[in-house]
Image: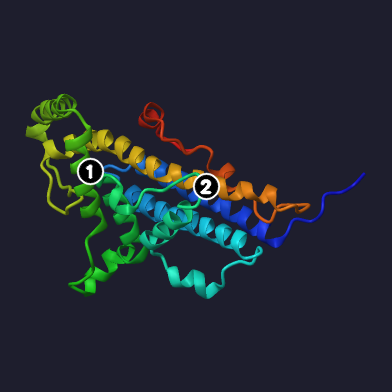
Amino acid sequence: MIGIPPFPTSFLLLQQEGYLIRSCLATGLTELRGAHVHNKGSVYAALFNLSVGTERMLKATIIIDHMLKNKLSVPTRRQLMDYGHDIHGLYNSCVIIASAEPQKLQRLTDLDASTREIVGLLNDFAQTTRYHNLDALSSASSGKDPLEHWNEILLTILRSDVSSRRTKKIVAYAAAKASVISDSTTTVMHGFDRQALTTEQALTLPGLHDEALKHAVLYLMKFLSPIRDLISDLTHKAYTLGLPVPPFPQMQEFLDWISDDRAYVLRKRRWP
């Protein structure tokens, strides 16, 4: 029986990276879907995992493209470090790569406004604002609070993607509950903007956030899906190199659960 030749180190390391990317993105999307005003920790967990997963997905795409164009040599550590954690810069590099491939990527400026804001938040969080709480304790110039930024995004999505009928129903239901318990309840809570909440607001916001979050996840899926397709186009070229074993795995197989199907995404709460 003829054995399979050993897989190269590049294949094994990128395979491990694929598992990492899959885990980060799936965890991030799941955390995001349940991250309302009374569950702020999940907002941070989502931003951390999504920023790391997106950054590494883009870097893996750049590495594989570099290998294909440079006789399977990989970028130097210095070349990768020059990107830092700049998701915008990494995405722009992938837009250039995609210009020569069947799968094209929209330029950042051509993405819809909500997608740009979400990607901008991930970019800021990846580079600086993940330390906002600690930095703000000792410095006045610590960048925009990621929770405040996220709150602005949710408000925009509520206005643009959630029907006024649905919003009014949530508000009315919360107001009725608040009225029933008002004589026996004291509310000591704060919103994403650090402003004190009334009892009615504390009861209303989780429902409103739940409606906005499903659309926020859809925006992210629409952003990630073309990147998945680009990395699929690139990794399929492994079969054209005439090698006994491929130099990199089919990275899209780690991302086959990413979908921009509207009905599917809006009803789903856990990934993959």
Provide the secondary structure element on which disc 2 rests: helix
Decide which of 79, 187 is in the foreground and name it: 79
Q: CA distance from mark 2 to mark 1?
A: 25 Å
Mark 1 crowd level (few <14, some 14–19, many ≥20, 10 Å Cα): many
Give the residue at x 39% y 32%: 265
Q: Which residue is mark 2?
A: 22
Left or right: 17, with 118 as reference point: right
Question: What amino acid type should be assigned to the residue bearing mark 1?
Answer: Leu
Dot 2 or dot 1: first in sequence order is 2
Instruction: Locate residue 57, reporting x and y percent.
Output: 49, 54
Decide which of 89, 50 is in the foreground and name it: 89
Give the residue at x 37% y 30%: 262
Work out which quarter of the rendered image holds the N terminus and state it.
top right
Left or right: 245, with 96 as reference point: right
Left or right: 59, with 124 as reference point: right
Give the quarter of the image for residue 181.
Answer: top left
Q: With respect to residue 14, does 35 lie above or below?
A: above
Give the quarter of the image for residue 70.
Answer: bottom right
Instruction: Locate residue 131, reporting x and y percent.
Output: 32, 66
Q: Which residue is mark 1?
A: 154
Give the residue at x 53% y 49%: 231
